[in-house]
Amino acid sequence: MTAPRPYHHGNLRTALLQAAERAVEAGGTESVSLRELSRALGVSHTSPRRHFAGRQALLDALATSGFDRFEAALGRAVRPQGRASFKTRLTRLAQAYITFALKHPALFALMFEAKHRADAPPELLAASSQAFAHGPALFAEGQAAGEVVAGDPGRLSLVVFAALQGLVTISTNGRFKEIDLDTLAKESIEWIISGICPRK
Amino acid sequence: MTAPRPYHHGNLRTALLQAAERAVEAGGTESVSLRELSRALGVSHTSPRRHFAGRQALLDALATSGFDRFEAALGRAVRPQGRASFKTRLTRLAQAYITFALKHPALFALMFEAKHRADAPPELLAASSQAFAHGPALFAEGQAAGEVVAGDPGRLSLVVFAALQGLVTISTNGRFKEIDLDTLAKESIEWIISGICPRK
DNA sequence: ACCTGAACACCGTTCAAGT
DNA sequence: ACCTGAACACCGTTCAAGT
């Protein structure tokens, strides 16, 4: 007798998410088709419905998974190792941000598109918030150590992350591929920091 | 005898572009359907083909038109009026950038999506380049007047525009609507400038 | 519980044909 | 030149039915 395995996959949900991510990276979000994914996975075209309410729900779940991994990458980068200065940690955070974005450019674009949708699901917004919480936390620590000017840490962080996001937007898939983005990130951070940090 | 007017519109091409822009602002790029536009304009669903090679070509033309208007807005903002300082002019440029983006958020998003496509048409890239040329030009003038540090003006401009683009991305349709973006732009420029301009 | 097949209402694109 | 209608190959979504 055969094992009572779920008809096709051990986990169709996971398989769909993985296939969708490959499709996104290969041809952008709009190239994701439930029917095509189903075909590739050898499953009827209505099977995804068991795991996702619809195409948008699948994309939202993929975006959420992206933010979770993004959060983990930023967390690893900013975690204090030994006694690093605020500037060093901020630079590491920035480089982790850019590295993730360049490694998964299409997923990264999807993450922001999904987050900006008017009816984005709460888990997606929560995952996004967690990822972006690393900025204000670092700024607050920097302030406590006297390395950063006073002011709302969320506001300070917002400007820095906005600059990073802009660099990524302009660079990803863009005509600026030839520019060394690590260097550019470092330069930007230098400039921003010299405006943020107290003059000695 | 009736005048030999083109069957339906004086200019179906223009009417399609306008209808498409309304659709984009109303429901995002992916809500644009050639068949729906045709229906709304009282024309057969194959008529658009006479004016645009396909859906993507219509969107590209719309994006190009957006960049043309964007370029004009930036040009007006940066044009020297009296003897404004570099800092004043850069602030004006930044505010024009943000104002345009917030006035046409969905069109603005489309403009960048279209520009980033691998097979973006040359007119689109040219229109985009013209718009973004205002930055380096202003920085070069600032350098000539001794108001900006040395360095590649294109590179300097890129960082500033990246920061603006990031603010717009984070703000548009986002959870940061409550933040006064004009103030935020001014703050960002202050910080960046204090890093860019020579210390007195 | 999980998956299927047929059906419905849409798409974009192509092409021979009309005026 | 400019527009049309039928046809083709896709979609996402719904729903009654199977195991």
Image: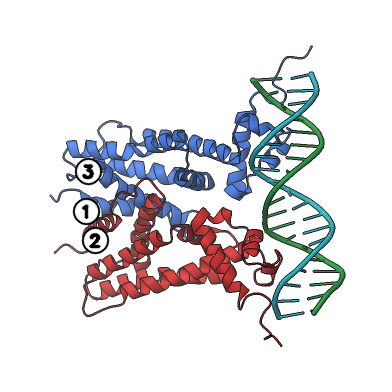
Chain colours: A blue, B red, C green, D cyan
Relative to residue D7, is residue A183 drawn left or right? left
Report the mark closest to the observer, 1 or 3: 3
Mark closest to the chain's N terminus, 1 or 3: 3
- Residue at the disc numbered 1: A195
User: Dividing the image into 4 quarters, which one contains the N terminus of chain B?
Assistant: bottom right
Estimate how packed mark 2 is, as few (under 14), some (14 to 19) or many (20 or more) residues with alpha carbons within 10 Å. Answer: many
Residue at mark 1 shares a chain with residue at mark 2: no
Report the mark closest to the observer, 3 or 2: 3
Instruction: Please tell me whether mark 3 sits on a helix, a strand or a loop.
Output: loop
Residue name at image x 70 percent, y 18 percent:
A5
Cα–Cα span, label 1 and label 2: 8 Å
In the rendered structure, find residue A150 and report the number of the disc placed on it.
none
User: Dividing the image into 4 quarters, which one contains the C terminus of chain B?
Assistant: bottom left
Front residue of A55/A110: it is A55
Q: Using the rendered image of the protein, determine whether residue A163 is visible from the camera's viewpoint.
A: yes
What percent of the width, then of the height, locates residue B132?
Answer: 41, 68
- Residue type at mark 3? Asp
Residue at mark 1: chain: A
Front residue of A187/A13: it is A13
Instruction: Please tell me whether mark 1 sits on a helix, a strand or a loop.
Output: helix
What percent of the width, then of the height, locates residue B41?
Answer: 62, 67
Cα–Cα span, label 3 and label 2: 20 Å
Front residue of A195/B45: it is B45
- Residue at the disc numbered 3: A152
> Are dots 1 and 2 in contact, CB under 8 Å?
yes
- Residue at the disc numbered 2: B193
